[in-house]
Image (cartoon, grey):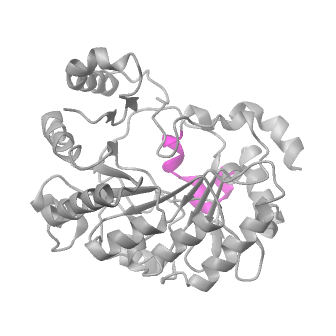
């Protein structure tokens, strides 16, 4: 039985029309997948968002006095070395001299208190706090306290953590649930033990990962918490749809949602093939990246990147160790960055020049048609 929130298509079982088609939904899903694979005229298909029930049409709400999404990286260290992730390429990180470490709780507390105070006087509010970026967030033992503080300060509507679940034992699970975590997304790198070893370049057991998720799900139910459990499979293996279907059937027994998505793109795509040779579908590409206008990303060391996939830390526009959130969000460096995009000069920015990630942006994030208006507003 395909998951009640069918991956990719974002179909929700609570829709009154859907129950009439439940017995046929798996067949419908894979037929539609086949159509999408073969028909290149489908441009920017909308998906069910990871957070909330609907996507925000960015062109209707800009300019924002607060970002829609706030990402803070608890740790850019990782025990996995996934072949499709920049953090797995140690030599490349060394070449770009990317720093490594974990965010201190003191710095995190300082940042959230600033945001909390500033947000009291704004029209817009942060929708989601994403506690992950370049590494494995569960490596930071202060993560439950970070979640708890965000909930206490009412920073946002939804707190989400993405993890590889290798450290998700019962003790850690209980702490995350008690902290008030809204969603736990587990990233699965392979559907077989052999490929799991090859892709993650670890000796960890794939079945153990699934067992950790299952136990988390069972503990959540036992504790009567509302944390959503999501499994997200990065489809880097080109498996037959029947194998993916079997995976969904198995995982929906101990999750609330299963997502299958293609290998994502990154900034600086010219320096490494992050897609491992897998060709993308020919989707439309935005001229202006929406992220500088709607998101705020804090690296583990307090520096601020414009983009959540800025693995090289090449889009830095501030440092919250010695600047305030307001200084950066409304500051000169971010303003100049936005203007380069609006003026069609994205190629002048190193990480943005050959960015692959922008090709996956959704139509709800398209602001190309209002560039002239935004240039006046952000001048």
Residue 10: x %, y % from top left = 40, 32
Left-right relation of 223 to 352: left
Majority SS type along the magenta span: helix
Work out which quarter of the rendered image holds the N terminus and state it.
top left
Residue 199: quarter of image: bottom left
Residue 347: x %, y % from top left = 64, 52
The residue under the point 42% across, 52% down is: 226
Residue 370: quarter of image: top right
Residue 196 vertical placement versus 249 (above, below)? below
Left-right relation of 324 to 50: right
Residue 120 vertical placement versus 135 (above, below)? above
Range of magenta residues: 345-361
Q: Which of 164 and 241 is in front in this view?
A: 164
The residue under the point 14% across, 40% down is: 246
The residue under the point 34% across, 74% down is: 172
The answer to if 355 sits in the magenta stretch is: yes
The residue under the point 16% across, 45% down is: 250
The answer to if 62 sits in the magenta stretch is: no
């Amino acid at each position: 039985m395909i998951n009640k929130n069918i991956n990719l298509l974002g179909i929700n079982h609570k829709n009154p029309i859907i129950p009439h088609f439940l017995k046929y939904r798996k067949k419908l899903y894979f037929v539609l997948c086949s159509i999408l694979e073969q028909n290149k005229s489908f441009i920017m298909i909308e998906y069910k968002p990871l957070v909330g029930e609907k996507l925000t049409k960015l062109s209707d709400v800009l300019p924002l006095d607060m970002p829609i999404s706030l990402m803070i990286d608890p740790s850019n260290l990782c025990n996995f070395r996934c072949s499709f992730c920049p953090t797995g390429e140690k030599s490349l990180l060394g070449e770009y001299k990317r720093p490594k470490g974990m965010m201190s709780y003191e710095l995190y507390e300082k940042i959230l208190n600033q945001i909390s105070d500033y947000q009291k006087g704004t029209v817009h509010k942060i929708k989601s706090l994403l506690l992950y970026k370049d590494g494995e967030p569960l490596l930071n033992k202060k993560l439950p306290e970070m979640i708890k503080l965000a909930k206490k300060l009412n920073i946002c509507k939804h707190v989400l953590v993405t993890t590889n679940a290798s450290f998700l034992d019962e003790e850690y699970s209980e702490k995350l649930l008690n902290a008030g975590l809204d969603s736990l997304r587990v990233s699965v790198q392979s559907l077989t033990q052999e490929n799991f070893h090859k892709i993650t370049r670890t000796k960890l057991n794939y079945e153990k990962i699934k067992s950790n998720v299952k136990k988390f799900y069972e503990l959540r139910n036992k504790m009567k918490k509302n944390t959503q459990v999501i499994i997200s499979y990065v489809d880097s293996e080109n498996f037959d749809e029947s194998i993916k279907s079997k995976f969904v059937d198995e995982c929906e027994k101990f999750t609330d949602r299963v997502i299958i998505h293609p290998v994502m793109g990154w900034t600086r795509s010219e320096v490494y093939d992050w897609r491992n040779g897998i060709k993308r579908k020919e989707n439309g590409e935005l001229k202006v990246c929406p992220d500088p206008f709607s998101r705020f990303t804090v690296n583990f060391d307090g520096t601020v990147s414009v983009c959540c996939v800025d693995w090289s830390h090449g889009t830095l526009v501030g440092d919250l160790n010695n600047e305030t959130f307001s200084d950066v969000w409304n500051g000169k460096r971010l303003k100049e960055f936005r203007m380069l995009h609006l003026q069609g000069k994205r190629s002048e920015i190193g990480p943005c020049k050959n960015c692959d990630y922008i090709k996956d942006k959704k139509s709800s994030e398209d602001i190309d048609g209002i560039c002239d208006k935004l240039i006046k507003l952000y001048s």
